[in-house]
Amino acid sequence: MASASIAVLDNPSDADRRAILTPLDAFNKTKAGDENYEPIAIVLRDEAEKIVGGLWAQLYFDWVFIELLFIPENLRGDNLGAKLLSQLEEIAKAKNCVGVWLDTFSFQAPGFYERQGYERFATMDDYPKGMARFFFRKVF
């Protein structure tokens, strides 16, 4: 029987992460097939062409996960968030994805996602304390 010791790393490195991720990815592939990972970025640029916001997502296992979505305060109210989501959804549909999912905090924009047709499927209370983290999805 194999044995292992347990150690807590104070400053874990990217190599430490890869040492866990590489065999996990290999195991997942034996069960679920290739994840078909693909990053997707849709950005907002200012007049100087500097990126000031936008959307960062990841396609894998036939779903798109929105990791980041940010609209600067001075650009809010121009429907840019809805336009970014719509464009991402079109990309996801063209790639035959099942849907899009994301998480957001109660102090961010849960109502915005609901207005865009996203359904809340989970809530984690007290994350951060006194607030909540919501998980949304939109199935095509």
Image (spheres, rainbow, N blue to C red):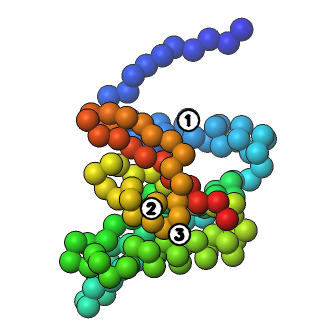
Marks 3 and 2, Cα distance to the nearest angstrom?
19 Å
Q: Position of residue 44 (x, y in %)?
A: 36, 80
Q: What amino acid is found at the position of numbered circle 1 in the picture?
A: Ile
Q: How many numbered tags mark residues here? A: 3
The residue sitting at 21% across, 77% down in the picture is 74
Tell me the residue that label 3 is attached to: 40
Q: Position of residue 29 (x, y in %)?
A: 74, 45
As helix, strand or loop, the secondary structure at mark 2 comes to helix
How many residues crowd mark 3 within 10 Å: few (<14), some (14–19), many (20+)? some
The residue sitting at 68% across, 54% down in the picture is 61
Q: Are marks 3 and 2 in contact (CB under 8 Å)?
A: no
As helix, strand or loop, the secondary structure at mark 3 comes to strand
Q: Earlier in the sequence, mark 1 or mark 3?
A: 1
Where 126 sits versus 38, above or below? above
Q: Quadrant of residue 32?
A: top right
Tell me the residue that label 2 is attached to: 113
- Residue 20 numbered mark, or none: 1
Taking the view exactly as shown, the residue that stands out farthest to the left is 74
Q: Nearer the viewer, mark 2 or mark 1?
A: 2
The residue sitting at 37% across, 79% down in the picture is 79
Q: Earlier in the sequence, mark 3 or mark 2?
A: 3
Residue 109 in sight here: yes
Q: What amino acid is found at the position of numbered circle 2 in the picture?
A: Tyr
Quarter of the figure that contains the N terminus: top right
Q: Quadrant of residue 31?
A: top right
Q: Is residue 116 left or right of residue 34?
A: left
Taking the view exactly as shown, the residue that stands out farthest to the top is 1
Where 16 sits versus 101, above or below? above
